[in-house]
Image (spheres, rainbow, N blue to C red):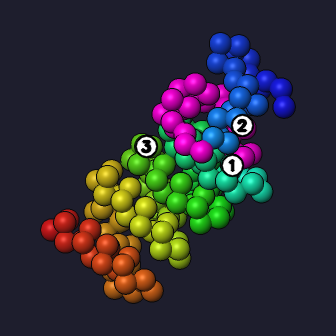
Amino acid sequence: MAKSNSNTAAQDFDAQELLAFLRQDELDYPAGAKKFGKTSLPFLAELVQGSNENLSIKAAYLVGYIDDEAGNDILQMAAEKGSAPVRIAAAFGAQKRSAKAAESILSKSLDDTDPSVIKFALRSASAMKLEKTFRTKIDKLSKTFHNDEIKADALNVIKKMK
């Protein structure tokens, strides 16, 4: 792949360099977000939707660190349609968004059936102080979810709200 088609050469990114970054074992996501920036979001969206799960997961995490409204849509899509690890990345990334964007993403994540996705959604909701917004969903999780650990986590979030 060649350079992206951005009109701003100063903010251009090299797709091969981005892929090399994502293929590393340990990533510095904040540094990657700063380096590749919002012009990389369309390419990252393609990776999130792609068939390479490892790249999809890492791309979703990176999107969470890029401060741009277009990232909200990508994380929303990842929360709805990705594999469980991609949905976890979306739930984690929600805590780096605005409250409104986080609400939309976490609403999907808290309705998920995968315990790991819900665990990260609960953490993100707490980190963003959105527990009261999701009180009904969290209360339901504490009473009816099929995983006892998630029930306990949700109950702890409810107790901390009081």
Counting residues from the N terminus, which is met first, the one under dot 2 or under dot 1? Answer: 2
The residue identified by callout 1 is 55
- Mark 3: secondary structure: loop
Crowd band around label 2 with a 10 angstrom C-alpha radius: few (<14), some (14–19), many (20+): some
* Quadrant in which the N terminus is drawn: top right
Real-space CA distance between mark 1 and mark 3, rounded to the nearest whole angstrom:
20 Å
Majority SS type along the magenta span: helix
Q: Which is in the foreground here, disc 3 or disc 2?
A: 2
The residue identified by callout 2 is 19
Counting residues from the N terminus, which is met first, the one under dot 1 or under dot 3? Answer: 1
Counting residues from the N terminus, which is met first, the one under dot 3 or under dot 2? Answer: 2
Q: Is 26 on the left or on the right of 2, as rendered?
A: left
Please tell me which residue is depicted at 32% across the width and 73% down the height of the picture: 154
Amino acid at dot 3? Lys
Q: Which is in the foreground here, disc 1 or disc 3?
A: 1
Crowd band around label 3 with a 10 angstrom C-alpha radius: few (<14), some (14–19), many (20+): some
- Mark 1: secondary structure: helix
Real-space CA distance between mark 3 and mark 2, rounded to the nearest whole angstrom:
23 Å
Task: Examine the rendered structure and indicate whether residue 14 appears above or below residue 112.
Answer: above
Please tell me which residue is depicted at 55% across the width and 42% down the height of the picture: 26
Q: Is 108 on the left or on the right of 152, as rendered?
A: right
Q: Is residue 5 visible?
A: no
Q: Which mark is residue 96?
A: 3
Amino acid at dot 1? Leu
Magenta highlight range: 25-47
Is 131 or 46 nearer to us in this picture? 46
Task: Examine the rendered structure and indicate whether residue 120 appears above or below residue 102.
Answer: below
Amino acid at dot 2? Leu
